[in-house]
Image (cartoon, rainbow, N blue to C red):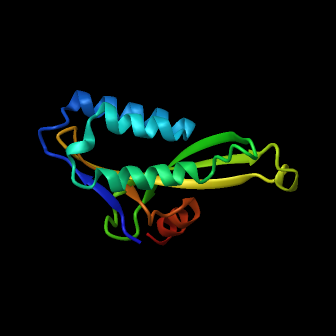
Amino acid sequence: MSNTTIILDREYFTAEITKAFLYDLEIACKTMEPVLFAKLFITYDLSFVEDYKEVLSTILSRMESWNNLHKETELLGVKQFDSKCMFCKIGKTVKAYRWTYKYTKDLKYKNVIFGLSIAFYFDFDEDRLIEFGVCNGFLDKEEMNKLNSLG
């Protein structure tokens, strides 16, 4: 798998805008609402970036895959954990999120708790965001613990 990345002009994000972007991203990740991720791309006008559609599409497909209106999906919780990418960004810190949910109207799965994850990586230059992407090859908590125990 490869990562989906946006490379930003080094002058586009100031330190203040970077801080605001990361804050808004955190809010979107806590709710896992697709509309908040789309709004993020509009608010910070990332349309000039060549691969923005691919990055946004990757995020939205991941967000929309879990929320089923017919089964009435209930978000149970979202946990953030630090990770590492095991492919093209090996060694970089990655911020990963795991959310759990259940279907309240699907009798077959009413008592089953499901979980999905997504991860983002960032690159900064003097507190300015210069790279933002979706990591498709991040390590989960158990893999990180194994990696850390080997060192």
| Depth check, front residue: 149 or 66 | 66
Specify whether residue 133 is in view.
no
| Depth check, front residue: 135 or 69 | 69
| Depth check, front residue: 132 or 139 | 132
- 123 is higher (above) or lower (below) than 40: below
Image coordinates for residue 118, horizontal then vertical, percent: 50, 54
For this orientation, the residue located farthest to the left is 11
Is 12 situated left or right of 119 in this image? left
For this orientation, the residue located farthest to the right is 107
Image coordinates for residue 50, horizontal then vertical, percent: 22, 54
The residue lying at 36 percent from left, 63 percent from top is 3
Residue 14, located in which quarter of the rendered image?
top left
Is 73 situated left or right of 145 in this image? right
Specify whether residue 57 is in view.
yes
The residue lying at 56 percent from left, 49 percent from top is 64
Image coordinates for residue 26, horizontal then vertical, percent: 45, 36
Is 15 situated left or right of 34 in this image? left
For this orientation, the residue located farthest to the front is 70
Q: Quadrant of the C terminus?
A: bottom left
Number of labels in the image equals 0
The residue lying at 60 percent from left, 55 percent from top is 116
| Depth check, front residue: 6 or 82 | 6
- 75 is higher (above) or lower (below) than 5: above
Image coordinates for residue 148, horizontal then vertical, percent: 48, 64
The residue lying at 82 percent from left, 44 percent from top is 105
Q: Quadrant of the N terminus?
A: bottom left
Residue 30, located in which quarter of the rendered image?
top right
